[in-house]
Each structure stands twice: as C-alpha cells, then as structure tokens.
Amino acid sequence: MRFTKGKTAILVGLAATLVAVGATVGAASSAAKCTIKGTAKANVLKGTSKADVICGLGGNDKLSGLGGKDTLLGGAGNDSLNGGPGTDVLNGGRGKDSAVADPEDKVIAVETVRYTRPLLSQFSFKGAKFTIGSKKFTEQLILGQIAKKALEYTGANIDDQTNLGGTSVNRTALTSGKIDMYWEYTGTGWIVHLKHTDPIPNSLKQWQAVKREDAANGVIWLPRAPFDNTYAFAVRKEAVARFGVRKISDFKTLIRTKPKDATLCVGTEFSTRNDGLPGVEKTYGFKFPSGNIVKVEEGLIYKLTDEGKQCNFGEVFATDGRIEGLGLFVIKDDKQFFPIYNPALNVRASVFQKYPRLARMFQLISLQLTNNRMSKMNADVDVRGKFPDQVAKAFLKQYSLTN
C-alpha cells in the first residue's frame, strides 16, 4: 500500500523528547537572523530557492519553504509550517501548530505533524543481517517484533530469536554474540547487569549512566522510550478494603495481624533480584512468611491474583494491559523503591560500529512508545487475543513509521 501524503501522526511531547538530539539545531535556529519576517497579523510567508530563515510573529501564520535548507520559526500563534524540498528545521514555537514535513526534517514544538512519506523511509539497511532476541513476556515479544518489522522495512534480513528466555539468557546471548540486539530496561541494566544497589531516580540520568558504564562491556544503549514498565504489586479491586493494603508499607500491618492473607504470587526472577522482592522487604522492613510466596510463571500471576485462591497479591508490570482488563488495583510504592524501567534497544558494539544510524532510527521508534500506547498494545495481546507481530505492525503504521 502506498503512503498517503495526508496521513497524520500526532506526536505527543515531541519537542521535549527531541531536546537531546535537536537542542543545538533548535538553539541555533532561534538565534538565526530572519530573512523573511511576518507581522503581528496572520501572514502567508513563502521562501525562495535559497536557504531561508522564515519567521512568523504573533499571528496564525502559514510558513512555506521552497528548495533550500530552510528554517521555519512559527512564533506565538497557531501556525502552519511546510518545509518543502530539502532538509529543513520546523519550529512551531508557542501555540498549537501543525506541519507538513519530510522524514529528514527536524521538527520541534509542533503538535500535529503530517509526513510526506514514512519516517523510516530515510533509512536503508539493505543487505544487513541482524539477530534479534527478546524475553518471554508479552511486552518484550511486542518490542522484539517492532524491531524486527522496522528493520525488515529498511531492507535488512532478520533472524528472529524473540521469546529467547529470561533476562540473563538474553544478556548472555548478546555479550557472547549469539544475538545482535534485544530490548532491555534501564533499571535492569543498572541493578542486575552492572550490579549497583541504588537506582538513579531520574529517567534521563539513569539512562545516561547505564549507557556510559555498559559501553565497557561492549553493549550500546540506543535512545530510551518514555514509558516506564516498573514493577508493582496488585490486588483485586474488590478485596482492597478487606485487606487494607493501598500502599506497600501497609503490608507490614497485614503480615503482623493477618499473616494467612498475606499471600503473594511472584516470578522466580523477581523473588531473587535486588530490585525485586528481597529489596522490597529490606526497604519496607517486613518479610512475607516463606510459605506465603507462590513462585509461578509471570504470565500466570495476573489471573491468579484476580482469582484470589493461591495468592491475594501479585507482582505485576506497570504497563501490563491485564491490570485494566482484570480490574486489578495497583498498590502504591510509597517509598519509591522500584527503579525506573525505560526500555532501550541494546546493541552489540561491533554491530553498532558498522551501523551507527540504528541510533537515530530507533530514537524515532522509541519516541512513540508512551505508557498509554504500550499498555494498550499489551492489552491487545493479553486481553483482546491479537498476536504480537500484528500489534507491532499496526503500531509502526499508525505512527507513520512504516506503511
């Protein structure tokens, strides 16, 4: 199917997320001298065949480049920007702005962007071969399929090793060269792989720290996604009042007064990780009775928690679609123990050195992975019965990454 020029992508929070890559461009553009300048009224400003700096002022302006490498600055109104041919900078400024852009353009502070062709059409990995791994739960399967289908769109050949195993299996496969990439979470990288005990309570700084330190292990962290799939505990909503556990510190009272009700389903990995159950118990000053811990496959925890027979409480992932689907109540982490878990594609250094444009490509993909979108995709699989590859394909198309 051909890409329709009129297809619209709503890019939520694009300005803030692009700062890391586009800050220099944006700062230079703001300080640039205007060659074509509007007034306080609603202007229609068109560029020339040269590299123009076209500036709106206070009205609802329409700014159009022509053939050069143009910079369009929208001003304070609700502006419409059209870069035209060439690699342009489109900065909407204040107001609710819209733009028509080529995938190669730098788009800053624009609420609605209509791309002339798919964003990933600017990349070509024809002839390259990549082996992609993933962990075994729904979200990881979706992320793995997103990477697979995106790279296939650019012409790459893919050896699909998604659903490979747990965290340690994928990490070992990556560092040993059995796979080239898989999605990992910043909190996991920092605490499990790099052996730190204290997370960094800032998303950007946590990513920067793990990226910097893990480079020594031959692992490159590509730009992170904004969604945070941190751990949480959940209970069925109808039992919240009965057990009195609305925040994690409430477990201390429940364990002391009604120990038989303090039953917890967890995955085997969570039961031993520093950022899992042992760390929670140490931080909050309580300990579940050993006979109350039920270790099961993580995919079963949601159903078992909802049933309330084997366990009243369960370890869950914050973006899992089954939380909403089953009507579970997420217990507040009132001491903010759990680290930030932003996902980022991990790539072997030797692979990244050969294909450095993977960073820019997966930044465009990661920008679209918000909490709400990831939760919906997880629910599409776990609640609505779709397959991970179907969900991944729909995501890439919906946000104008592919057609």
Image (cartoon, rainbow, N blue to C red):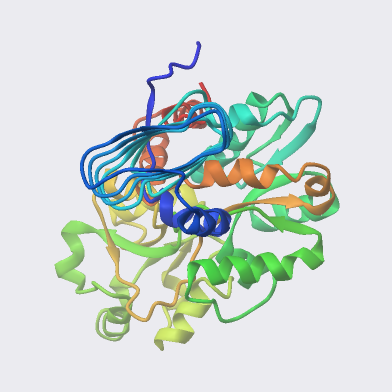
**Residue 54 horizontal/vertical position (percent):** 43, 42
At horizontal 43% and vertical 16% (from top left) the residue drawn is: 4
Left or right relative to 1: residue 333: left
Q: Is residue 402 above or below residue 297?
A: above
Q: For this rendering, which residue is in front, 282 or 162?
A: 162
Image position of 314 with respect to 179: above or below: below
Q: Is residue 402 left or right of residue 39?
A: right
Q: Position of residue 393 (x, y in %)?
A: 50, 27
Please state which of residues 399 and 178 is positioned toward the viewer in this rendering: 399
Residue ID at (44%, 58%): 228
Q: Nearer the viewer, residue 26 or 172?
A: 26
Q: Nearer the viewer, residue 136 or 189?
A: 189
Q: Is residue 367 visible?
A: yes
Reply above or below: 241 against 2.
Answer: below
The picture places residue 330, in percent across and down from the top left corner, at 29, 62
Q: Residue furthest bottom?
A: 285
